[in-house]
Image (cartoon, grey):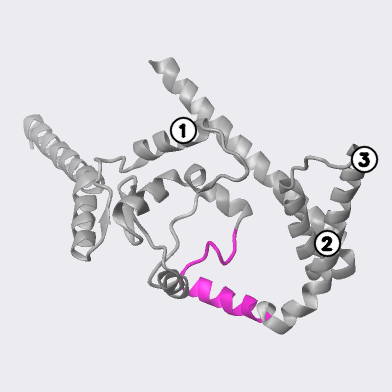
Amino acid sequence: MSKTDISEVAVAAAVVVVTVLIWKGLNLAWFRPKKHEAYLKRQGLSGTPFTFLVGDAVREASMVEQAKSRSISLSDDYTPRVMPMILQTVKDHGDTCYMWMGPTASVIVTKPEHIKEVLNRANDFPKPPVHPVVELFATGVALYSGEKWSKHRKIINHSFHLEKLKIMIPAFHESCIEMISKWERLVREQGSSAEIDVWPYLEDVTSDAISRTAFGSSYEEGKRIFELQEEQGRRLVSTDKEQHEDEANRQRSKV
C-alpha cells in the first residue's frame, strides 16, 4: 500500500470519526431533546419550549438573579425567591408540566398522589446522577436507586414505626427545651425583646435530637460527628469553588 493510499484511508477514517462525533453531539443537544419533547406533548403535558443545548438554564439564571435582587419581608411568600423558574412554569403550564435542565426534560408533579407514586416506584423513577464530590459526604437512601434503595429502605423502615417514634419523644422534647431556654436567655439579656436568627438553632436542635436518639447518653459524640461532617462539606465546597475559579482564570488568560 502506497503512502497516498494510507493518507486516503487516514483521511476517510478521520472524516468518519468526526461525522460520528458531530452526529452524537447533535443528537444529545437537539434531536433527542426534541424527540422527548414530542413524546411528552403526546402524553398531554405542556411545558417550556426546548432551547438548543442549554434548555432553560439561561432563563432560570436570569429569573434567580431577579428574584434575589428584590428584598422580601418575613410575611412575604418565599416560593418565588427560592424556585422562581419552577413556580412560573407551573403557573404557565399547569400542575403537571415539564421544563429543561440543559438537554434533559424535567417533569414537574405537584399532586400528592403523583408524588407518592414516584417515591414508591424507585425502579421506574431512578435518582439523577450525583456529582462525585457529593458522594464523599452525602450518601444514603435519598441518593440510592433500584435494588440498593429498596434494601436500605427496608432496613430503616423498622426505625420509623410509630411506637418507636413515641419512645424518641422525650429526647426531642429535651432538645427543644434547651433551644427555647437559649432564646429566653437572649431575650433577658437584651431586655423585653430580641431579634434572633433561628436558623442556626434549628440546625443544632436537629443534630442534637438525632444524636440523643442514636447515641443515647453519649450524644455529645454524635454532635461531634455532625460538626465534622459540616466542616467536611465546607471544605469540599471551598475546594470545588477554587477549582472552578482556577479554570476560569486559565480560560481568561488564554483569551
User: Residue 180: x percent and y percent?
Assistant: 84, 55
Left/right of residue 79 with respect to residue 111 in the rendered view: right
In which quadrant will I find the C terminus? top left
In the image, residue 246 lies in the stretch drawn in magenta = no
Helix, strand or loop at disc 1?
A: helix
In the image, residue 150 lies in the stretch drawn in magenta = yes
Stretch of the chain drawn in magenta: 139-158
Residue under the image location 55 percent in, 63 percent down: 142
Left/right of residue 151 with respect to residue 194 in the rendered view: left
Helix, strand or loop at disc 2?
A: helix
Disc assigned to residue 189: 3
The residue closer to the viewer here, 238 or 61, is: 61
Mostly what secondary structure, the magenta segment? Answer: helix
Residue 229 visible in the picture: yes
Disc assigned to residue 175: 2
Residue under the image location 88 percent in, 65 percent down: 218
Q: Is residue 225 above or below residue 119?
A: above
Q: Is residue 222 above or below residue 2?
A: below
In the rendered image, which quarter is residue 94 located in?
A: bottom left
Q: Earlier in the sequence, mark 2 or mark 3?
A: 2
Q: Earlier in the sequence, mark 1 or mark 3?
A: 1
